[in-house]
Amino acid sequence: MIKNLISLIFTAVVLFTQSANAQKVLNPTETNWVNEAKTELQRALTEMNMSEEERIRIIERSARTLKEYGQPPAYPTDKIPVAEMMDMNFELCKRNITELNDWWLNLKQISKDEKIKLINAMQIEVVEKQIELILPGGNGAIQLSQEAIGNAFGWNIVEGFNEGEENDARSLAEWFKTLVERNELTDKISLLINDEKESLKKVNEDRTKFKITEAKLRQKYKMAEMTTQTMKGYAGSKTAESGSQTTTASSGSSTDFGTSPKKVQPINVLIGTWRFGFNDSGYFYWTFNNDGSFVFSDKMNEDSEDRTGKYIVEGNILSLYNSDGCEKILGKYPFRIIDNEIHFGNIDDKCIERQLTLNHIWKK
């Protein structure tokens, strides 16, 4: 009798210990709330045109939601994407000024015929509202807006941009030649350099101001997290998609939300691993993580190391930056998801190796 009683007590203790140590899995509704909090946080850290008040409101709300449901902190430990983009814009503007100044000095020293030859040898690319000038012997592309070109060179943007990118580039080259004939091209470039210098000052001012904002955002996240308590039993909980596949909406939860389970939504449609390749030759694997980072794995070629980078998704535009081999080049990839496949549109990426590698149809 005593033996049986001891056995029952021992079994009860074991079961209680296992239950106490079991990691809670959020139900689908709770998982939706957690994922929405992460999505909103990512939006507050990546969107350029958002007020400080709106960023703070989103960040505080996201921090509280994640803490309540036992999730780890999601605020980046390093510089946030908005600040990184501002730094990239600053560096791009500095490079534009250097390239334009070299172009201006060169044009001042050569004859009219040589100027025409130089313009004929230039590459001019028009992508949406951006214009890139690639000079023979230059050190990089000069990236300018339609507005900057129109203001400095007196080019009629409305007429110049109504026939498509190829004709736009051709008409701009012809306008440069017209300015050469009028002996006005070097003066126009000088004007453009001055405009870019003013832009550089503005970009630097905005970048400096945002450093204060960034420190405030980090502090607001920490304060919201510190003043929020994790709900009882939710410490270290897992989301539904990372928990057991057999877990139902009610298992492991003491809360009845009075609603049918919703489909769990990821932070964005690209989260996860995608692949391109063939059975015979192997595959490339492209993994997008929740924290705004990605990893590219080449399994087609032996001894290839994984490459990493960062990304932002805004609408249907995938922006890649700080990626291995293309650290200071921003690539923009318009995309559509069709039947679990990524299809790219008109890619804007001057990192040729990255563009050629990624411009395929990727399957999940």
Image (tube, grey):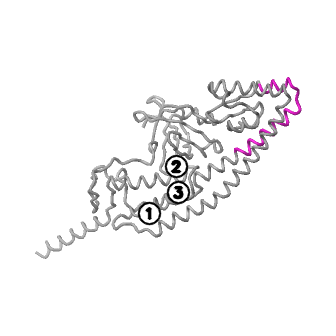
* Whole-percent x, y for residue 250 in the image: 26, 56
* Amino acid type of the residue that numbered disc 3 sits on in the rendered structure: Glu
Image spot of residue 154 (x, y percent): 75, 33
Give whichever of discs 2 and 3 has the lower sequence position: 3
Q: How far apart are marks 2 and 1 (CA)?
A: 21 Å
Q: In this view, does 87 lie to the left or right of 342?
A: right
Question: Could you tell me residue 306's position as x and y percent?
Answer: 54, 43
Q: Residue at 44% of width from left, 48% of height from top?
A: 267
Q: Which of marks 1 and 3 is in front?
A: 3
Q: Where is residue 8 in the image (x, y as percent from the top left)?
A: 17, 70
> In the rendering, which numbered label is found on residue 54?
3
Q: Which of disc 1 and disc 2 is earlier in sequence?
A: 1
Query: Secondary structure under badge 2?
Result: loop
Instruction: Examine the image and state in which quarter residue 363 appears.
Output: top left
Marks counted in the figure total 3
Asked if residue 228 lies in the magenta stretch, the reply is: no
Residue at 65 percent across and 25 percent down: it is: 166
Sequence-wise first label, 1 or 3: 3
* Mark 2 or 3, closer to the camera: 3
Find the magenta span and give its range.
Answer: 92-119
Report the residue marked by disc 2: 292
The disc labelled 2 sits on which kind of residue?
Gly
In space, the residues marked 2 and 3 are separated at their CA atoms by: 20 Å
Q: Mark 1 points at which residue?
A: 64
Query: Which element carries disc 3, helix, strand or loop?
Result: helix
